[in-house]
Image (cartoon, helix red, strand yellow):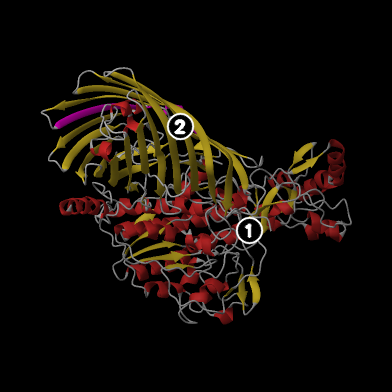
Amino acid sequence: MKKVLFLAVFTLASAVMYAGGYRVALQGNKSLAMGHTGVAVVNSAELVFHNPAGLVFLENKLSIAVGGFGVLSNVAYQNEVTGASARTDSDVGTPIYAYASYQATDWLAFGLGVYTPYGSGVAYEDDWAGSHLVNNIDLAAIYVQGSAAIKVNKHFSFSGGFIYVTGSVNFNRNLSRSLTDLDGNRSEVTIDASGVSNTGWTVSAMFNVSEKFRLGATYRSLIKLEADEATADFENIPNSPATPFADTNATAELPLPAEMTVGLSYEFCDKWLFAFDLNTTFWGEYESLDIDFENPAIPDSFNARNYKNSSTYRFGLQYEASKNFTLRGGYYFDESPVQAGFFAPETPRNDSNNYTAGLTFNVSERLQIDASFLYVHFKEINASYDSYTESGVTAPFGGTYKSNAFVPGLGLTYKL
Amino acid sequence: MKNYIKITAAIVALGFISCDPEFETSVEDAGFYESGTADFSNYVAVGNSLTAGYADGALYITGQENSYPNIMASQFTFVEGGEFTQPLVDDNLGGLLLGGTQIAENRFVLAFDADGNPGPVRLEGAPTTDVATSATGPFNNMGVPGAKSFHLNAPGYGNAAGIPTGAANPYYARFATSANATVIADAASLNPTFFSLWIGNNDILSYATSGGAGVDQTGNLDPSTYGPNDITDPNVFASVYSGQVAALTSGGAKGALINIADVTSIPYFTTVPVQSIPLDAATADLVNGQFGLYNTVALPGLVGAGIITQEEADLRAVNFQAGVNFPIMTDDDLTDVTAILMAQGVPAETAALLGQLRQANDTDLVVLTASGVLGTLADPANPLSIIGVAVPLADQFVLTSTEQGRVAAAAGAYNAVIEGLAAANELAFVDAKAALAEVAATGVPYNGGVLTSQFVTGGAFSLDGVHPSPRGYAFTANAIITAINAQYGATVPTVDIGNYATITLANN
């Protein structure tokens, strides 16, 4: 049949999408508070994610940053022609991160990080108007990264790293717009996969033009999550040779696209820091979501996605207000990778304006508490997914979508 | 530290206050859709099986849930529509019991036989809906399967004691408010603010589906003398129908009147081809030989004697050819020449066979149920008794052009009454005849396909070949909503018919 997926997770981490596609840009409370900039900002172990090359410029022997977010993400749908409407009732997503940096020598540093840059959690009411595309989805991927950074001189450093990813997915949708069993229960399928893993790599560089002006660049490779042992659980299937949907195994593949970030930071007036990042995610890799059911009687599912590469423009500002407090604010514009006619309700993302704020409280010389808040604003959009077919005839699913997300976060930073 | 806690708490709290995204204008807002000059707060639907949601040869729960009035009522909720109650039966099998004895069959489902060929079969199982156990009516959906126009005004039509004799209707007996209640009075007692009335289909349909076995009662103004398969006199229809409209509008209700579709729009009459008997040349010659005397002696003789016209003689001539042939059939509109042939020395059995015999032609419509009869053996022990070749197809399986003419004439007269009363009472007029004709002729495109009246695959009709599928009912609901919106300046939204099911798959 049609769509579906698979992917990843550890245990409790359940990330929720709020960025383009299923990218979840929540990789540190300090950076998020500054519009999720950080490729050229040297202020904590969050560099393990943003730019490990900068680790060699941290002043401490050991730096640790841990934290998490609560993602409250909501989607509303309506169709003015039919009056159909729906709202998601999604669980609070909890993306997490943990980074550690160790300064081995004056010129060599190591970084270790765990973070969740991809995920999605959307739950519509069962049998809603778009239930043939998705009822609910829970997708999570956990990255574990180890990096080494080398300082060439006080101006330049670079790093390389290895990434291990484990992921899971649980996805439910109805088989068609109208198929039911004898009692009118909609026929549905649940695809489930967990412990799907693969590896990737990352490289980065930092260039300090002056003491106050830094440039940075980070590239993270494409990682394909290939679910070879997903299970497909079919429910409410009519007893008929024409509907041979028995439970079976399935294989599918989901790309976690590569991304490239370049940026700068500039200190001014002693206490101020400005940062800008340009992030490009190579979503063009995500052309189609295809499910291959092991049972040959069950037609495979081909679901065009046709994502395009998309960019995020990030701006952040930091102000050291006092000995105890550092205040941060930021904004970023997030381009959606979804093209017209491919707007699927499982990742209903159009371009968004994102506003961030946060602060750090210095508990002691060594310990800091970081807090941040993100508000994601999507414009109302009329959009449709035009590639759904029944009996070879396309049946577009469209309407008006309105989404938002509120993301409070808390973290700790420890320096030794 | 205290400050930090306060600020953090404030930030965290922000995340938990109302996060719901709001549309600039929401379909759920009052006033987004308008009711115009109509009031949909209490909608009552009156009619027959079509209104009840009957499908697949039975009335079952999911069919009722997809009845056009229920679909309309769900859309009326956008314009302050109220609760819509239906006399739901007790299961999804659809059969009926009367005091524990089954009196109506279960629904059809599409099953595949051992060779993989699909076909409608009755769903197996013991039905649980006993019409002796009454449901407390009246209901907003007052559709009564099997009701003709005059039945709605007939006291006792819901009296369970009359079911065995056919004087009462089992479906109405389930929820009639009393033994002497009438459907129309029960409906009017709900004080509808809005109603729909779709009645009259069975006044011609039972005649048509019985292959014209009944009588055209045009001219007979006493419906109590009608048989179940007769055509209702148009004046009787006009009289009872105008009474129904008067009863439903007496409280000032607005409403919609729906006209009667052509029987030629439904797969019951269009699925089985008339030309259906394959013969090789040798067999055709053999059979023609048997009709040789009939063609060359009897028919000219009858013309010569002035008993039949040359035209009738031409119609009655039998001529099989190699290839696919029209079957022979009995046509009760032909001159019955049995006695004359017997008088000429033709054996009684042969004379009876030839008495009203002709070969079918392409103006005839063969009913769906003939598919299990045509080409089979009338006498399993006699390989020569092929129905349609050596044994005429019975009259009940063929709706001849003459019979079609009677049906069309009556339907035309009913429709004139319906349209006239709609105009006179400023009610919405729904041209179901035109809508179904379009489905049958060209199909109607929708999001994801084209709705046609092709049996099984077309999407519009259920497996009984007469009643719509849920998708067909959704199409009907949209047609009615469109007419209502036009009449009353309302903007009730329509449904996406692609979301409604067609036929049900199930192997017993």
Residues indicated by labels 2 and 1 sit on the same polypeptide chain: no
Pair 2/1: label in front:
2
Q: Residue at x 73, y 44 (%)?
A: B276
Amino acid at the residue labelled 2? Ile
Circle 2 residues within 10 Å: few <14, some 14–19, many ≥20: many
Above or below — where is B83 with respect to A301?
below
**Foreground of the two, A300 or A6:** A6
Task: For mark 1, give the secondary structure.
Answer: strand
**Residue B196 to residue B262: above or below:** below
Q: Which mark is residue A163?
A: 2
Residue B376 in the figure: left or right of residue A72: right
Residue labelled with disc 1: B108
Point 80% across, 48% down: residue = B389
| Marked residue chain, label 2 | A
Question: Which residues, given as a range, are shown in magenta?
Answer: A272-291
Quarter containing the C terminus of chain B: bottom right
